[in-house]
Image (cartoon, rainbow, N blue to C red):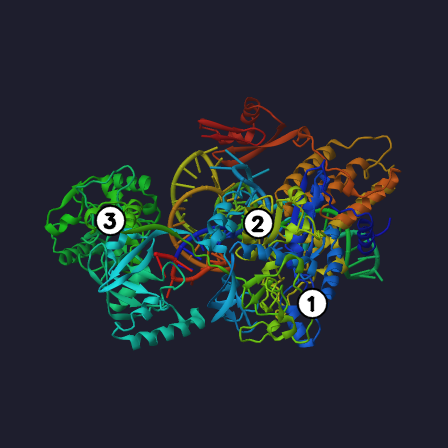
Amino acid sequence: MQKYDHKKIEGKWQAFWAKNKTFIAKESAKKPKKFVLVEFPYPSGAGLHMGHLRPYVAGDVYSRFNRLKGFETMFPIGWDAFGLPAENYAIKMGVHPSITTKKNVANAKKQIQSWGLSFDWSREINTTDPEYYKWTQWLFLQFYKKGLAYEATGLINWCPKDKTGLANEEVIDGKCERCGTIVEKKELRQWYLRITAYAEKLLEGLKNLPEWPEAVKLQQENWIGKSTGAIIKFPISNFQFPIEVFTTRPDTIFGASYMVVAPEHPLIKNQESRIKNYDEVAKYIAKAKEKAEMDRTAEGKEKTGVELKGIKAINPATKQEIPVWVADYVLGHYGTGAIMAVPAHDVRDFEFATKFKLPIVQVVAPEFVSKDEPPKPELPFVPRNAVVCLVRNPKTNEFLCLQWQVSEAWKTFVTGGVEKGEDYIVACQREVAEETGYKNIKLVAELGQAHEKFYHLLKKENRHAYFKGFVFDLVNEDKTEVVGEELAKHKPVWVSEKSVAAFIKGAVFKHFWDLYKTGPKALVESGVVINSEKFDGLKTEEAITKMGGEFGKLTVQYKLRDWVFSRQRYWGEPIPLIHCEDCGIVPVPEKDLPVKLPNVKKYEPTGNGESPLADIKSWVKTKCPKCKKTAWRETNTMPQWAGSSWYWLRYADPKNKTKFADMKKLKYWQPVDVYLGGMEHTTLHLLYSRFWNLFLYDQGLVTVSEPYKKRHPHGIVLGPDGEKMSKSRGNVVNPDEVVKKYGADTLRMYEMFLGPHESMVSWNDQGVVGVRRFLDRVWTWVNEIAEAPHQQESGIRNQESRAKDTDKVQRALNKLIKKITEDLENFRFNTSISAFMEFHNEIKDEFITLESIKTFLILLYPFAPHIAEELNEKVSKVEKKKVGSLQYLSWPNFDPALVIESSVEIIVQINGRVKAKLTVAAGATQEAVQAQVMAMDAVKQALVGESVKRVIFVPNRLINLVI
RNA sequence: GGCCGAGUGGUGGAAUGGCAGACACAAACGACUCAAAAUCGUUCGCUUAACGGCAUGAGGGUUCGACUCCCUCCUCGGCCACCA
């Protein structure tokens, strides 16, 4: 037997697959299709790393599996090759980015092939290929023609290091997504794509993606950030134009005690003459702008602002004059750039009002009535009024006395231990009585004991209270006293215990408990409207629509902002537009596409907001396609994300010269069945490409509205030290070295064995050998059987006389088929690897037929294709059968009758504790099992003097006797 | 601050209501060897001399039975972050 030499066999089979075009996908009239997509890489000089390996291997395994299942499977790859590293290299070394790209692509291709990935190379694409970016430009023009691409001057995010503008999505924590430099704000003329026009569609589309992870959908949903509310006009005294605000809480309008406008708000300029302290205001605005350019987290979030003296607004609900402030906590780009401030019910307004001593008016009371207790008009709990309660923690027997006062905020009295005992309580009572002026209140009746009924009620109705570990003893004689609004009038009200429970649930725990912990704060939860004239008593949700409609107009707002779509760099797709003095902006005619990048010597970005292309006069100067007069080319290029916003469509028809893709081919291949990629693209590429696809769908250019049926994210691979792999840490594991030392099959299997595909895992250099050992054992096992088919059954396995597997092998193999099939369908690769090992451990000394070995090899093939092919060749030769690739065979089915064991071990429990085990035939009835169990010694002993009250029987699993 | 996810041996992880720790790594011992490596075999959560007892971040609940479901708290990770 030859040794398992991965170097020899892996090269051999990689060449075989390439020569036989094993993985070329063709539109087939007969077969259903699968489109398996992985995010195409940027071909960097450093080559591909573990971050690429993970999704690629998963996609490869899944593709090979689906081909065996009979699907025409497309598993394509390409290069997302526009981008900064090649350009920066060009600046440094003077080598054209296309040359660097070519070199890096060749290198990455070699890597990919050495990993044994079954990509369809006939569909390879490259975003920097003019034949490809011709269509990126063409698609951009479709956006332009529909008014979804527009030019505007605005404050945009600017990366000073990369010297280019950035989209909102490319700013992470105030830093550049690419280089980590702190992003500045810069006023620039830019191209935008109107993604906000698709906000609603992007949101709606998520509902039709049941196979997407909730986390991804949620993240996109939050990014789009839809909120419903109202636009309300606040008139300004002696001025015709009002201030418009957007609010999600029109129900709190009676509590709007001042207004705030953003520093950019036009009102400030318009009203310059009337603002008495304009100098101060102008100074503040200048400072705010500067602050925006600095790292905001370092600055902190201390509220700042200046009142616009001389300007007063009128609250349309109360008709009262309220002051207007300018503050940078109001953003110019969201809503209307102005707010009505309701400090009692908004944390930011509360903070601001507290700092600048502005009035705080409460207009919402926490709701305190439980479901089974409808609101009682005779119990108007308004939290401005004094409530006293004493809390006992049953665990520590600690007491806590809380009080809330009429005019001030909550006040915590004291916490104390049990040792303080009754005297402490009395002291509390006295203190409370003094504070409130109400003398007859009795706080606690039964010290140290839970008031049984009350406790029960809390437990049943108010888990929240119970689980906090506190029991309320709020008792006066045998009735419970709640001191509500009536307290002020010295007329106590008597209510049922049930109401008290509800009261505590609603009022104490929703609000008061937080206050105890954190001190006074705004009440942001929903509740009931108070202090709002005819609206009093309305619940929040109802009040929002009613009051929003009464005082303004109900509307919807999104956080999503338009996509800044131009970059001031060389190595990107030129935006195919021409500026003509007479005709304005004219699209480059389709016949003149692509607008190719000029060949230049100097790539350096200017840094002044102009693209380096602007310096190439001969390229910039052109003729207007309309009037033929001298005109100028647009010199900005497109962002990195342009090419990837439609690349999966091109895979369906990569060589098409007349269209970006043929409709018939799109119809066959769309949508992508599984898209493997990282979480980091959720609000970047994944959102952008959904936008492009939705737009193209509306234009009738693609066949489905949502491009990716299933999205499966992967966790990142950490270094052996559990830290993110990085050169500076020196913990980078290079996949190519693993291939060299252990082989691609080991690399692939170990990567999967590390843990669930979607969770973060850390690479363990020592762990790899476990997988290699397993493959070594499989190699030896199959070789021995193939080479010595006449061995004895004892010791070894194959004998001419036997034509059948042992029963054990049959059952184990069928179980394995079931397990692997299910795991592959659910992307649970890690447990598949374990299952292979278990199978081998279990049956390695059993008699197994060559046919069953082949079945095993088919199962193994998607995971470790090279060794599986090699061993299959060996077995086929022994059988004197034609040798082909395993890829052309079909995936085995399992026999449901054989996946169950013939006999099973039943767990015998008494009161849920394991007492014994019993082996019975599979499917044994309760009667049969129970009879046997009762006869067991261990059971007899345990049952002495006891009677069996109940028997729980789970067929083939356990029997539990309850005594 | 908001939202999402996760916490299980020395380590990676398995078990999604039914024997917790599958499968591996590491470690220890044994076989083979002059020896070492490789390979094969045995042991391997804590505690106890043992019977047993205790263990899935902490506490509580539901259940005959909880890593799994529910509640509260803690810790770590991710995304967003003054979005009205």
Please identify the residue farthest to the right as the structure is shown.
Answer: A880
Which image quadrant for residue A789? Answer: top right
- Reading the image, the residue beneath label 1 is A45
Label 1, label 3: how many angstroms apart (C-alpha)? 63 Å
Q: Give coordinates of residue A435: x percent, y percent.
A: 15, 58
Residue A848 vertical position relative to residue A343 in the rendered view, above or below: above
The disc, 2 or 3, on the residue closer to the chain's N-terminal end is 3
Residue A332, percent from left and from top: 39, 64
Mark 2 residue element: helix
Work out which quarter of the rendered image holds the C terminus of chain A and state it.
top left
> Can you tell which mark lies on residue A696?
2
Subunit under mark 1: A
Residue in front for this viewpoint, B43 or A940 = B43
Q: CA distance from mark 2 to mark 3?
A: 47 Å
Instruction: Where is residue B42? Give x, y as percent.
Output: 69, 47
Query: Is disc 1 in contact with disc 3, using a CB cutoff of under 8 Å?
Result: no
User: Along the polypeptide, which appears first: circle 1 or circle 3?
Assistant: 1
**Number of other residues with Cα within 10 Å of mark 1, as a class: few under 14, some 14 to 19, many 20 or more:** some
Q: In front: A701, or A93?
A: A701
